[in-house]
């Protein structure tokens, strides 16, 4: 059958896991930033920071490295662009920037390079740089292990952790070695994936590159991005174009400056690696085949398998070219598909209605859309307010007023401010006195909004730590003064599952808890969350009227959407919360909504789709 070759026409070059680690976004510092040699303060800070790190990996004197760290931080927080200080050689006027670093910056603007950085990049082994992706490994620790054991590669590090050499180093111990091994295992498992937000921005760039090119009649992302999965393997893009236009489109795609390597190229598919180290697959199909191909390449594989079985049960065959009638003997003419014009059309011919891509995971959707015409999924435009945000009162970057204005700018009508509670001292958690002071500031801001006729409200919230025994972080007489409370675990995430169960149960059943924050504490591709079965927690929360957050920060996306069916059955409420530590952080809302949809939440079960008055009533009823 000729369609089988469709996805197998070439074998992409397989990178080793370690090779792709090089591209891990966490340390993605551009080689040469821009050809016109205009650098933002952020660019400069990133390069200086890299020098500091490489110096430490090279065993240099700490004073020297610290000077670069400090310069990076200073420049990052300057209001004025450093680029305006180059011509008049004024960079040394910046407090904390000496002549030597100033010269590095002049060199950057004049030649596009910092010689010291170039030589450090040559001198310090890439293998060693990779160690920095191990969680808890800073450059000083890397250097120490490298130096004392005489090893450089991850493989060697792994071996030395296993044979006890790392544990026997001063200041290390068995626990540290174990942690390193665990983290390497994580890296091996996930090096091939990245977060949704990272993949999304690469996909957007590729779509923009192609969408207006001659011959492009249809274009869409497919694969896991289209399904709003929280981590992405490769990025799939599908184009509908005539075969005669395909070669030029592939040429545009593979010659883009954002592409560093062509992994494979065929007549209908081309795979590349981008500067971020991600693989992008572009497939070009005939416009008439676009809907069937889009359906197929959106997946998931499991959803496709279920649909194919359904087609067969109904005497048809389904593949990426469409639906085909089978004769009695089960064979068919693949040149003659049953007519279709859209994805919805194909689903209809299978006796069901269109399935939103984010639900295509074979978790009951085939059955659901056989019986129902549509699912009501929450939309970004349904969101009316921001809950879970931090200000300079704890570890946020902006004042309450600035955060409120940023919410207002984005069309929201309230901000539920939740700085950290007192136990989170490392994050500037508020003691009782500061809580009361903050309330006064919030009252004043609300009065000002009211006086100016602005229909916007700041609610007094707190992100209260859940203490080890499950209690909240203030006494009841303080707790009752808040409009609402997000209760989150921030320490001892690795306690035994039964203890964590008790801890979370107590927290969700506490009448003061409005929302349980990031329920597992996971950091995607970096750190596992606490090992606890959330099913009973979801039931208890639903019963108590406590919502469980979908933390919209793309590192978290926690509650996991895989609890969606359970949450729906239990009638659980959620709140889609950006957990914003800056004004830009508010924009993470989009990722949370994607996950909320994938977890089957409708508008009615998402707290922050409520209007100001409705949410206020909800807070009051919960107290
Ligand atoms: P990823 O890239 O790991 O994040 O996940 P996907 O879902 O994007 O997977 P990918 O890129 O390998 O393939 C894209 C879609 O193509 C996938 O969701 C379903 C379809 N597909 C690929 N290979 C197969 C297959 O062997 N069988 C079936 N039924 N579908 C496949
Ligand atoms: Ca993919
Ligand atoms: Ca793919
Ligand atoms: Zn938090």
Image (tube, rainbow, N blue to C red):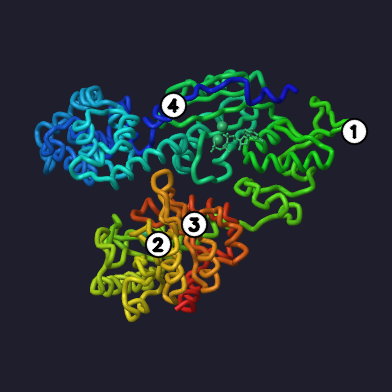
Cα distance in 3D space between marks 1 and 3: 48 Å
Q: Which residue is mark 1?
A: 328
Ligand 1 closer than 8 Å to label 1 CB? no
Q: Which residue is mark 4?
A: 16
Q: Which residue is mark 3?
A: 559
Cα distance in 3D space between marks 2 and 1: 60 Å
Q: Quadrant of ligand 3?
A: top right
Foreground mark, 3 or 4, reads: 4
Can residue 83 be seen here? no
Above-or-below relation of 328 to 487:
above
Above-or-below relation of 358 to 383:
above
Above-or-below relation of 473 to 362:
below
Pick the front one: 602 or 23: 23
The answer to whether marks 3 and 4 mark residues whose Cβ atoms lie closer than 8 Å is no
Q: Earlier in the sequence, mark 2 or mark 4?
A: 4
Foreground mark, 1 or 3, reads: 1
Q: Which mark is residue 388?
A: 2
Q: Earlier in the sequence, mark 4 or mark 1?
A: 4
Cα distance in 3D space between marks 4 and 1: 48 Å
Can you give x and y, in whole percent of width and height, for residue 118 in the image?
A: 23, 24
Cα distance in 3D space between marks 3 and 2: 15 Å
The answer to whether marks 3 and 2 mark residues whose Cβ atoms lie closer than 8 Å is no
The answer to whether marks 4 and 1 mark residues whose Cβ atoms lie closer than 8 Å is no
Residue in the image at 51% along x and 30% along y:
280
**Side of 106 where 38 appears, left or right:** right
Can residue 489 be seen here? yes
Local crowd size for mark 3, using a 10 Å CA cut-off: few (<14), some (14–19), many (≥20): many
Above-or-below relation of 355 to 119:
below
Cα distance in 3D space between marks 3 and 4: 32 Å
Residue in the image at 56% along x and 40% along y:
224
Can you give x and y, in whole percent of width and height, for residue 21 in the image?
A: 39, 32
Dot 4: what SS?
Answer: loop
């Amino acid at each position: 059958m000729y369609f089988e070759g469709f996805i197998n026409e070439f074998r992409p070059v397989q990178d080793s896991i370690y090779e792709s680690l090089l591209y891990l976004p966490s340390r993605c510092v551009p080689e040469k930033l821009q050809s016109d040699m205009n650098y933002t303060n952020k660019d400069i800070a990133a390069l200086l920071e890299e020098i500091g790190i490489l110096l430490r990996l090279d065993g240099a004197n700490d004073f020297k490295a610290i000077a670069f760290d400090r310069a990076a931080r200073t420049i990052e927080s300057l209001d004025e662009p450093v680029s305006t200080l180059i011509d008049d050689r004024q960079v040394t006027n910046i407090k904390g920037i000496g002549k030597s670093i100033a010269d590095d910056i002049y060199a950057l603007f004049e030649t596009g390079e910092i010689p010291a950085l170039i030589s450090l990049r040559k001198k310090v082994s890439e293998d060693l740089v990779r160690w920095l992706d191990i969680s808890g490994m800073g450059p000083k620790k890397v250097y120490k292990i490298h130096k004392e054991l005489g090893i450089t590669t991850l493989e060697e590090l792994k071996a030395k952790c296993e044979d006890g050499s790392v544990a026997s180093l001063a200041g290390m111990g068995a626990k540290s070695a174990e942690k390193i091994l665990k983290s390497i295992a994580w890296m091996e498992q996930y090096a091939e994936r990245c977060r949704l937000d990272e993949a999304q921005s690469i996909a957007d760039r590729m779509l923009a590159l192609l969408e207006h090119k001659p011959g492009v009649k249809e274009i869409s992302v497919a694969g896991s991005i289209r399904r709003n999965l929280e981590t992405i393997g490769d990025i799939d893009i599908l184009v509908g174009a005539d075969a005669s236009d395909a070669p030029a489109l592939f040429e545009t795609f593979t010659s883009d400056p954002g592409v560093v390597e062509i992994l494979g190229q065929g007549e209908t598919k081309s795979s590349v690696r981008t500067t971020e180290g991600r693989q992008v697959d572009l497939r070009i199909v005939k416009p008439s085949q676009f809907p069937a191909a889009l359906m197929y390449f959106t997946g998931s594989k499991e959803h496709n398998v279920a649909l194919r079985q359904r087609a067969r049960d109904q005497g048809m065959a389904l593949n990426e070219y469409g639906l085909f009638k089978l004769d009695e003997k089960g064979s068919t003419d693949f040149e003659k598909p049953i007519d279709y014009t859209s994805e919805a059309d194909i689903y209809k011919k299978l006796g069901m209605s269109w399935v939103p891509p984010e639900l295509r995971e074979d978790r009951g959707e085939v059955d659901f859309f056989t019986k129902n015409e549509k699912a009501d999924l929450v939309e970004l435009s349904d969101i009316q307010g921001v809950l879970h945000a931090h200000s300079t009162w704890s570890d946020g970057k902006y004042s309450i007023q600035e955060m409120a204005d940023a919410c207002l700018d984005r069309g929201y009508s309230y901000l539920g401010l939740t700085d950290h509670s007192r136990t989170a001292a490392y994050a500037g958690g508020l003691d009782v006195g500061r809580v009361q002071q903050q309330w006064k500031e919030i009252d004043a801001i609300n009065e000002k909004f009211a006086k100016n006729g602005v229909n916007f409200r700041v609610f007094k919230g707190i992100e209260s730590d859940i203490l080890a025994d499950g209690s909240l972080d203030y006494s009841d007489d303080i707790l009752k003064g808040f409009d609402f409370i997000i209760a989150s675990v921030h320490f001892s995430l690795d306690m035994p599952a039964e203890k964590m169960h008790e801890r979370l149960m107590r927290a969700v059943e506490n009448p003061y808890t409005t929302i349980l924050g990031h329920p597992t504490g996971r950091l995607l591709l970096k750190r596992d969350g606490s090992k606890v079965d959330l099913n009973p927690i979801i039931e208890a929360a639903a019963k108590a009227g406590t919502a469980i957050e979908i933390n919209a920060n793309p590192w978290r996306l926690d509650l996991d959407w895989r609890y969606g069916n359970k949450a729906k059955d239990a009638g659980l409420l959620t709140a889609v919360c950006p957990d914003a530590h800056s004004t830009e952080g508010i924009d993470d809302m989009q990722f949370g909504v994607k996950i909320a949809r994938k977890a089957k939440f409708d508008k009615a079960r998402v707290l922050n789709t409520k209007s100001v008055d409705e949410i206020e009533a909800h807070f009051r009823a919960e107290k």
